[in-house]
Amino acid sequence: MSRLVVVSNRVATPTETKGSAGGGLAVGVFGALKDSGGVWFGWSGDVVTETVANQGPKLEQDGAVTFATVGLSKKDYDQYYRGFSNAELWPVFHYRNDLAVYDREEYHGYRRVNSWLAHKLIKLLQPDDIIWVHDYHLIPFAEALRSAGIANRIGFFLHIPFPSPQILLNLPPHEELVKSLCCYDVVGFQTEGDELAFHDYIQQHAHGTVTGNQVEAFGRKLQTGVYRIGVFPHEIAEQAERGEARQDVMDLKQSLEGRKLIMSVDRLDYSKGLVERFKAFEQFLEKSPEWRGNVTLVQIAPPTRSDVETYQQIRQNLEYEAGRINGRFSGLDYTPIRYLNQRYDRWKLMSLFRESQIGLVTPLRDGMNLVAKEYVAAQNPDDPGVLVLSQFAGAAGEMTGAVMVNPHDVVGTSDAIGRALTMPLAERQQRYQTNMAALRKFDLGAWRDRFLTDLRGVRKSDDAQKRAK
């Protein structure tokens, strides 16, 4: 079997790939790499001097897997990562054009770093390698490889939403970016809606054709597909069960003093609908005074991109809202919202999910949202909690046993919280079984294997130079 070469913005550490702290990408990708042998290439997460950055990839071996990482210079970090990737692509792809800041120099830096990374990888490639590129940071990566004459099969998977054409047109270099995507052999999306948005752009603005999942545009041919990323539910269940007896979890249970527990875990990001969620919980306590003192919302929101001003403002707003709501409803022995701006070990989160009565997952827009799937997988089948889920999360297409909400509707989300807290056991069990059936059918292994099967089935390009023109 040909080697697999995975390319992602960040490379997980060997510890993260074994599931102690890593998420779906780390666990799923490492499983594929172990099976076929290969390379995981990308940024180490370190900002270094230009001299160090240009020294070449640092190699670390773990069995049949080679971890190959490079550092980024301060200029490259500012333009490629903090700049265009996260100040322009991230907000637009999450339908927040109002937060997007376009800077032409940052866009040039984004493309420059993609080209630089591609040339770093070329030195490690073998002729039969299968190359699997991940996420929005690396859209031009295949184009850079094709320009250098690389003919290997190259696939791309987008972990975030793909915006409708009307939204995407707000990006000044939208045509260049879609042309870059067409340099891949297979482009994968999380949902049918994301794939349709890409097809619509191809037909409406690229003068291309779409026949089924076959796309022809900019003189290139490729195929698209929907590959819903999942989790390994049995592993999560085992983590949750083992963690129940650990002291941290027992301490939380004791501190709740019999109160119901609502769990939310999100990165600190404007796409997650955190302020709207807090206001919905406030509305619930206002309308249902009998629940005051009897239910606690634990919101875990690890910091992210803390050097970006927009994210600093999000943290300030959330801290203000938590303090305001707690000021209204707290008692001497009761705090309605426990807001924790820190990271927790994966086993601890899974155990807290198992102890809670509601998993409140209400992003304003999300590619998939694995927290929703992890919450379900962590539940006790005999007495499961209820997943309250945003209709705008990709997971909503599978987790049909969830109580669905529109996160912009504060009253509707508030009503859903009340419904979930009072839901009869038989209904909770039925909803849990519905969700678990989907989790087992579309687990992390199925996502990984389906994508790689399709990519390996593509005929190897023998005219890479021509395709890159």
Image (cartoon, grey):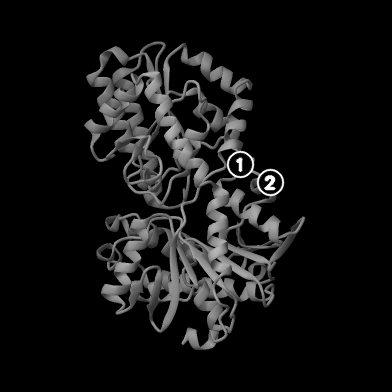
The residue singled out by tag 1 in the image is 21
- Tell me the SS state at disc 2: helix
Residue designated by label 2: 15
Name the quadrant containing residue 339: top left
Who's the residue at 40% across and 14% down the image? 334
In this rendering, does residue 299 appear at all?
no
Look at 62% across and 66% down and name the residue there: 49
Secondary structure beneath dot 1 equals: loop
- Within 10 Å of the Cα at label 1, are there few (<14), some (14-19), or many (20+) other Cα atoms? some
Query: How many numbered discs sit on the rendered protein?
Result: 2
Residue at horizontal 53 percent and vertical 83 percent from the top = 147
Q: Is residue 431 visible?
A: yes
- Residue 396 against residue 9 in the figure, above or below: above
C-alpha distance separating marks 1 and 2: 8 Å
Q: Nearer the viewer, residue 454 or 137?
A: 454
Q: Where is 42 relative to 333, above or below?
A: below
Q: Is residue 248 above or below residue 239?
A: above
Inspect the image, locate mark 2, and give the three-letter code of the amino acid beneath it: Thr
- Would residue 234 appear left or right of 83 to someone viewing this image? right
Quarter the N terminus occupies: bottom right
Pick whichever, 373 or 326, lies toward us.
373
Q: Nearer the viewer, residue 157 or 173?
A: 157
Q: Position of residue 243 (x, y in %)?
A: 61, 26
> Closest to the observer: 467 or 364?
467
* Whole-percent x, y for residue 121 in the image: 63, 72
- Residue at figure coordinates x 65%, y 65% from the top left: 4
Do the CB atoms of the residues marked 1 and 2 lie less than 8 Å apart?
Answer: yes
**Position of 66 relative to 303 (above/below):** below
- Name the residue type under label 1: Ala
